[in-house]
Amino acid sequence: MRLIKFLNELDMEELLELARELRVSIFKDSVRSYFERKIVEKLTRLDYLNKIIVKLDKPCITTLAQLVYFGTCSNKKYLDVLRKKGLVYKDMQVPDDVKELLEECLYPKISRSIRKKWEVKETPFLNLILLIGLMQRDEINIKKLKNNSSKSKIKAENKNAYSNLERDRDLLINFLEHQDIVYWKDNILLINRPELLLWNKKDNATKFELLYNWLRAKNKKVHEMVAALSRIQNDIDDWIEIDVFVEGDIPYTKETIEKFGLVSFCKIKDQGFVKLTPVVWYCIKGIYSSYWYSKSILISADFEVFIPHDFDPNIISLLDKYGQLKDFDYFLVYDIDPSNLKKELLYQESKSYQMFIEELEIKSDTMPQVVDYELRNFSKELSSFANKPII
């Protein structure tokens, strides 16, 4: 409902009281329509609303933000102050035309750009990429235990690099069962190859969305926070004060908030902040993170690639396909020496491998000459291998 409708419902004394608060000029022969018009003029001006908000204390601003974004608030003791300023009517209603302007006024008060300390983050989606890679290369055996949990034996050369899979393994196996990609036979986990081929043809945004939709039922509070953040957060780099969220929508611990890799959390002094992770931002907003365009990949002359855990999952997927995971520490570390790959198994991959090289070049500071030469030479061999006539 618009502001004028709320003003129409006030009695004359309430309207005069609001006019005095907003310093509307009062004349002896002023009529009701004059006061309504002057109040609307003031409360639908961005500069005037900013002047009001500057004079409000922090808890009052938080309450107003909750009303603007969620239509309710955690603490009702500040409602009378907001009603007196003409920002809230009836129980807890903010006029629609005022609300649109308040969103613009309030956003700088509840958001901040923060350079967060570097942290190692394993997420279910990252672990899903690694787990499926192990399965496709037959580098993992998984057995079901009597308590319905699982036990895995990794046959990859650098098996210690996969220790972080332990946390999400059973969760991801359940998801893959739900997708009909794996199944149990005599307590051994087996791959449904046709379904795995269909899975591989999906883009990573679709894969993430399938996982996210499945995870929604696992933690309703985290899903509610994601939905709320997607309404509030205007830019991928903005952190939003956690106090803005109505208490029922807040997961109570940092571990709960970050467990599924959907929301990032940080704390400055006693104030908590949250924001959507880049992959969630992409899936919800359809906007590719500027961070994923950055030159954040490091490549050594020893064919080692260092890539952040939260970087573009498309590149991580390609690295997992054409490289060997060596370490999972501050970076994911992959060995991309093409001599470890078998041309006869990749003869249909020449275009994908060429894209892999191009992505590495674009998103790394420098690619050592020896690495560039060997990768491109291997790419040419793949192309010629693929073009050989079948005899």
Image (cartoon, grey):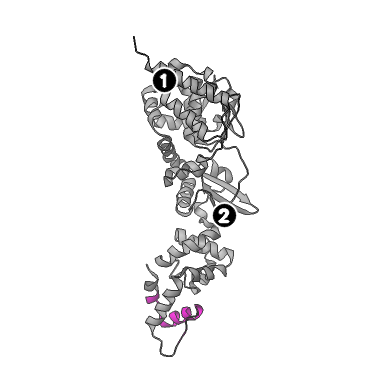
Mark 1 surroundings within 10 Å by alpha-carbon count, few (fewer than 14), some (14 through 19), many (20 or more): many
- Please tell me whether residue 118 is drawn above or below residue 133 in the rendered image: below
* Residue 18 part of the magenta segment: yes
Direction top: furthest residue: 391
Which corner quadrant holds the C terminus? top left
The one nearer the camera, 108 or 79, is 108
Tell me the amino acid under the disc marked 1. Ser
Q: Position of residue 281 (x, y in %)?
A: 46, 45
Q: Write the residue at 41% across / 20% down.
A: 383
The one nearer the camera, 337 or 119, is 337
Q: Position of residue 52 (x, y in %)?
A: 53, 70
Range drawn in magenta: 7-26
Which label sits on residue 102? none
Mark 2 surroundings within 10 Å by alpha-carbon count, few (fewer than 14), some (14 through 19), many (20 or more): some
| Element carrying mark 1 | helix
Q: Write the residue at 42% across / 81% down.
A: 35
- Please tell me whether residue 358 is drawn above or below residue 247 in the rendered image: above
Mark 1 and mark 2 lie on one chain; the one further toward the N terminus is 2
- Please tell me whether residue 206 is drawn above or below residue 335 in the rendered image: below
Count of marks, rendered view: 2
Q: Main secondary structure of the magenta part?
A: helix
Q: Position of residue 290 (x, y in %)?
A: 50, 44
Q: Which residue is mark 2?
A: 112
Which corner quadrant holds the N terminus? bottom left
Direction right: furthest residue: 269
Q: Which residue is mark 1?
A: 383
Tell me the amino acid under the disc marked 2. Arg
192 left or right of 248? left
| Element carrying mark 2 | strand
Say if residue 46 shows up in the picture. yes
* Residue 241 part of the magenta segment: no
